[in-house]
Amino acid sequence: MTITLKNVTKKIKGNTVTDNVNMALKSGTVYGLCGYNGCGKTMLMRLIAGLIIPSSGEIVFDGKVLGKQIDFPENMGILIENPAFLGGMTGFDNLKLLASIQGKISDDMIIESISRVGLDPKDKKKYRKYSLGMKQRLGIASAVMESPDLIILDEPTNALDSNGVVITKELIAEEKKRGALVIMTCHDREILEGICDVIYTIEHGIITDKKDMRTEETTE
C-alpha cells in the first residue's frame, strides 16, 4: 500500500486545522505524529481514515482518490481517541460483533487478538467493568484483529501500565513485520522514537519537521 497526501488542507468553521500537508507513506513502515494537544494530529488521522474530507488537496490510496474513487481505505484498522464498546457485553462478544460486519475472521482469530494485547479472552467481565487500561487494550485488539493493511492508532499507550506499553510496542513491531502501514500518535516522544521509522512533527496543522529514525536524517 502507498498513501500520498497532496497539499491537504482542512478548514472547520473558518479555522485551518490541517494546512497544506504533503506526505508519502508506504507499507511495512511505522509513522509517528508528534505535537502538542490540538496541533492537528488526530484531525490528520481522521482525514487519512476517510472520516472527514479535505477542504482542498487530495489523499490517494494506491492510485485511488479518497472521497472520489473510494469512500474509505479498503483494509483498515483504527483506534482514534477513546475506545467505545457496548457496556453490557464481554470483550470477546464486543469484538465478535464488530468482526461480524465483514465476516473475515474466525472466533479463534478474535481470541488470538485479545490474547496479544494481554487480556484474557475467556474473561466474562462486562466491558463497563473494565479499567481504563483494559479498555485501551481491547481497542488496540479491535484495530489489529483483521490483519489490516493500514493501522491507525491515536495514543495507543494512553492509560497503559509499563507492561501494557511493552506489549503495544511488540504488537506494532509484529504488524510492521507482517507488512502493515502503521500511523500512530503518542504524547511521549521517547516512545515514538522507540517504535517509529519516521516521525512527523506538527504545529498548527503544519508539518514542521520530518525525522527518519533509520538514518537519523531530519528535514524541515
Image (tube, rainbow, N blue to C red):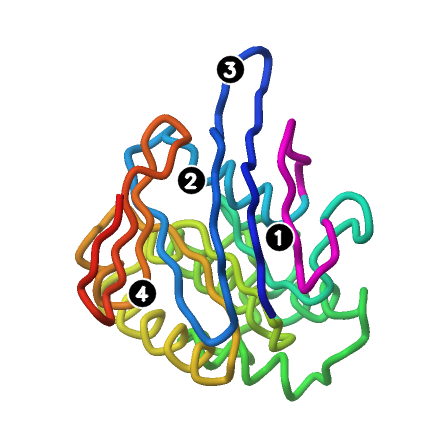
For the N terminus, the image quarter is bottom right
Q: Nearer the viewer, mark 1 or mark 2?
A: 2
Q: Amino acid at mark 3?
A: Asn
Alpha carbon distance from label 1 to label 2:
23 Å
Alpha carbon distance from label 4 to label 2:
15 Å
Q: Amino acid at mark 2?
A: Lys
Decide: few, some or many residues near mark 3? Use Cα within 10 Å; few <14, some 14-19, many ≥20. Answer: few
Left-right relation of 13 to 42 = right
Residue 39 picture quarter: top left
Q: Nearer the viewer, mark 3 or mark 1?
A: 3
Identity of the residue drawn at 31% across and 65% down: 196
The answer to which of 174 and 94 lies nearer the viewer is 174
User: Mark 1 sits on what residue?
Assistant: 85
Which range of residues does the magenta coloring cover?
A: 51-65
Decide: few, some or many residues near mark 2? Use Cα within 10 Å; few <14, some 14-19, many ≥20. Answer: many
The answer to which of 32 and 80 lies nearer the viewer is 32
Q: Position of residue 127 (x, y in %)?
A: 56, 57
Q: Nearer the viewer, mark 1 or mark 4?
A: 4
Q: Amino acid at mark 4?
A: Cys
Decide: few, some or many residues near mark 4? Use Cα within 10 Å; few <14, some 14-19, many ≥20. Answer: many
Alpha carbon distance from label 3 to label 4:
30 Å
Tag 3's secondary structure? Answer: strand
Q: Position of residue 143 (x, y in %)?
A: 56, 64
Q: Earlier in the sequence, mark 4 or mark 2?
A: 2
User: Mark 3 sits on what residue?
Assistant: 15
Q: Amino acid at mark 1?
A: Phe
Q: Earlier in the sequence, mark 1 or mark 2?
A: 2
Q: Earlier in the sequence, mark 3 or mark 2?
A: 3
User: Mark 4 sits on what residue?
Assistant: 196
Q: Position of residue 165 (x, y in %)?
A: 28, 66
Q: Earlier in the sequence, mark 3 or mark 4?
A: 3
Q: Earlier in the sequence, mark 3 or mark 1?
A: 3
